Image: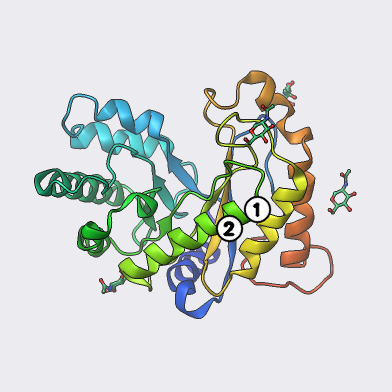
Amino acid sequence: MKPVSALATSLALLASSASSASAFRVFDNTAYTNTSIGYGSSNINWIPNYVCSPLLAGGSLPSEAVWKATVQQWITYPGYPLVLDCEQLYFNDNNAATADTTLLWLSTLQTWAAQVLPSGSVVGWYGLVGNTNAGLYDHYRTLIANHTPTAFFPSAYTFTDSFATWKSSLTAVVATAHAINSSVPIVPYTWPQYHGNYSFFPVDLWNQQLNYLASQSATLAGFIVWGGKNHAVCGDACQATAGQQPWLNATRSFLSTLYGVYNGLPTLSGGQLFSGL
Ligand SMILES: *[C@@H]1O[C@H](CO)[C@@H](O)[C@H](O)[C@H]1NC(C)=O
Ligand SMILES: *[C@@H]1O[C@H](CO)[C@@H](O)[C@H](O)[C@H]1NC(C)=O
Ligand SMILES: *[C@@H]1O[C@H](CO)[C@@H](O)[C@H](O)[C@H]1NC(C)=O
Ligand SMILES: *[C@@H]1O[C@H](CO)[C@@H](O)[C@H](O)[C@H]1NC(C)=O
């Protein structure tokens, strides 16, 4: 059974939250062994770059049938947003023909994806907004016009132990998103591991990030916690012990306060609590 009414509410709130700040969703896009976040976090669907990239390797789009089968295989939670991660399809090449082809491919892939999803599903692109050249904002606007509802899903990954550096990268990508279209919700991707060497970074820095993201609820529709699905950056030993690392307790404590999970009043709305059998 799908919680249909809760889902419809969730989607409507995600789609409208940029302007109204009515809900702040924290999505669990982790896949560490035997570890899920819970505590009011939301579901999300995602097709990783390591799946998309080989499908584009021939220098052409996959067939419609292959792409739709791929989407269906990766839709774990129908009705929740779908994030597509195809990192060779970025608007970072000013050559006009290249940019036009990228737009055509992105549009085609998201259209085909939407055709096998429940109507009204949010579909958007990981990392694209942070990799769009200033001269190609109109290309992204055309992509946005091709599918509604959508959202920006920029990277807010961590490269150093500096909170200030992390924050200024996030500020920059939010400014780009606003310049492209200030009414499209922004939902950044976080990850409790360093992007460079994949070790779990200090929990104090993670806590600073969580609290900062929540403080930006007027601008952000929420954020996503990623990790664990790609063995190249988290092997078996990492997968199996990830849930024992302090980031998980910190995240649950944060969510417990944010959504008032135990008795307290929520700081922000948007928690998705278990609502029955
Ligand atoms: C991983 O990278 C971070 C950021 O550069 C650094 O601070 C940390 O010491 C590195 N950890 C390991 C185990 O190499
Ligand atoms: C921004 O996106 C919204 C939602 O898709 C759309 O209705 C609006 O026309 C877009 N604005 C511009 C300037 O493209
Ligand atoms: C994960 O859970 C399964 C089922 O309870 C168990 O058999 C397995 O050993 C667990 N794996 C780890 C790494 O804890
Ligand atoms: C879990 O996090 C809370 C809040 O930061 C902290 O008070 C508590 O000591 C942590 N528990 C463990 C086992 O680390």
- Left/right placement of residue 232 relative to residue 253 reads left
Image point (55%, 27%), residue name: 233
Q: Residues within 10 Å of mark 1 (few under 14, many from 20)?
A: some
Circle 2 residue:
167
Please state the horizontal and vertical placement of residue 205, each as a whole percent of the image: 71, 49
Q: Outermost residue, left direction?
A: 97
Cβ atoms under marks 1 and 2 closer than 8 Å: yes
Please state the horizontal and vertical placement of residue 100, each as a whole percent of the image: 13, 49
Q: Nearer the viewer, residue 213 or 258?
A: 213
Badge 2 amino acid: Lys
Secondary structure of residue under mark 1 = helix
Q: Where is 260 relative to 91, above or below? A: below
Q: Residues within 10 Å of mark 2 (few under 14, many from 20)?
A: some
User: Which picture quadrant has residue 197?
Assistant: top right
Secondary structure of residue under mark 2 = helix
Circle 1 residue:
163
Image point (54%, 31%), residue name: 229
Report the image quarter containing ligand 2. bottom left
- Left/right placement of residue 233 relative to residue 185 reads right
**Residue 19 visible, this angle:** yes
The image shows a total of numbered marks equal to 2
**Residue 143 visible, this angle:** no
Q: Nearer the viewer, residue 132 or 122?
A: 132
Badge 1 amino acid: Phe
Please state the horizontal and vertical placement of residue 30, each as a whole percent of the image: 59, 40
Ligand 1 within 8 Å of the CB at mark 1: no
Distance Cα–Cα, label 1 vs label 2: 6 Å
Image point (35%, 64%), residue name: 149
